[in-house]
Image (cartoon, rainbow, N blue to C red):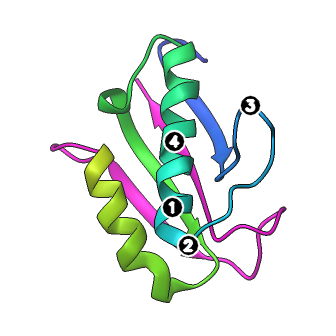
Amino acid sequence: MTDSNVYVSGQGPVDPSSGDVIDGDVRKQARRTLENVAAVLDAADRSLDDVVKTTVFVTDMADYEAVNEVYAEYMTAPFPARSAVEVTSLPVPIDVEIEAIAE
C-alpha cells in the first residue's frame, strides 16, 4: 500500500489454503484469480469496488472473451481501466493472471 493506493501484484488461479494451482478451464481459473485479488484487497480494507486499474494477462487471446465474461461477474460499473496482454507463458502453468490497483 502506498498513500491510499493498494497495488495487487499478479494473482493467478491458486488455492490459497494449499498453494496449488487449481484444475479447470480458463473460466474457472479466472474466477479463482479474481477471488484471490478480492482476498488481497480485503486484507488491505479494500474491495473490488475500489479497483481503478487492472492488467489481465492471458496465454491465449482466444480465451479473453471467456475471461471477460467472468470479469463482468466481479466488477461493476463504472468499470476500472483495463489492459489485456497476451503472453507466451506465465511463471507457473496457468492461463490467466490479473494485477490490480485500488484506491
Give the number of the disc on residue 100.
4
Instruction: Answer above or below: position of 14 versus 88.
Output: above
Q: Which residue is mark 3?
A: 17
Three-letter residue code for mark 3: Ser
Q: Secondary structure at mark 3?
A: loop
Three-letter residue code for mark 2: Asp
- Sequence-wise, which precedes: disc 1 or disc 4? 1
Category of crowding for the residue at label 3, using alpha-carbon neighbours closer than 10 angstroms: few (below 14), some (14–19), many (at least 20) = few
Question: Which residues make up the magenta segment?
Answer: 75-103
Q: Secondary structure at mark 1?
A: helix
From the top left corner, tell me how far across and down residue 2 is, in percent. 60, 17
Q: Secondary structure at mark 2?
A: loop
Image quarter in which the C terminus is found: top left
Q: Along the horizontal axis of the image, is 48 left or right of 17? A: left
Residue at point 27% right, 55% down?
Answer: 72
Front residue of 71 and 14: 14
In space, the residues marked 1 and 3 are separated at their CA atoms by 17 Å
Category of crowding for the residue at label 1, using alpha-carbon neighbours closer than 10 angstroms: few (below 14), some (14–19), many (at least 20) = some
Category of crowding for the residue at label 4, using alpha-carbon neighbours closer than 10 angstroms: few (below 14), some (14–19), many (at least 20) = many
Name which quarter of the figure residue 66 lies in.
bottom left
Three-letter residue code for mark 1: Lys
Disc 2 to disc 3: CB gap under 8 Å:
no
Category of crowding for the residue at label 2, using alpha-carbon neighbours closer than 10 angstroms: few (below 14), some (14–19), many (at least 20) = few
Q: Which residue is mark 1?
A: 28
| Residue at the far bottom in the pictured view | 62
Disc 1 to disc 2: CB gap under 8 Å:
yes
In space, the residues marked 2 and 4 are separated at their CA atoms by 22 Å
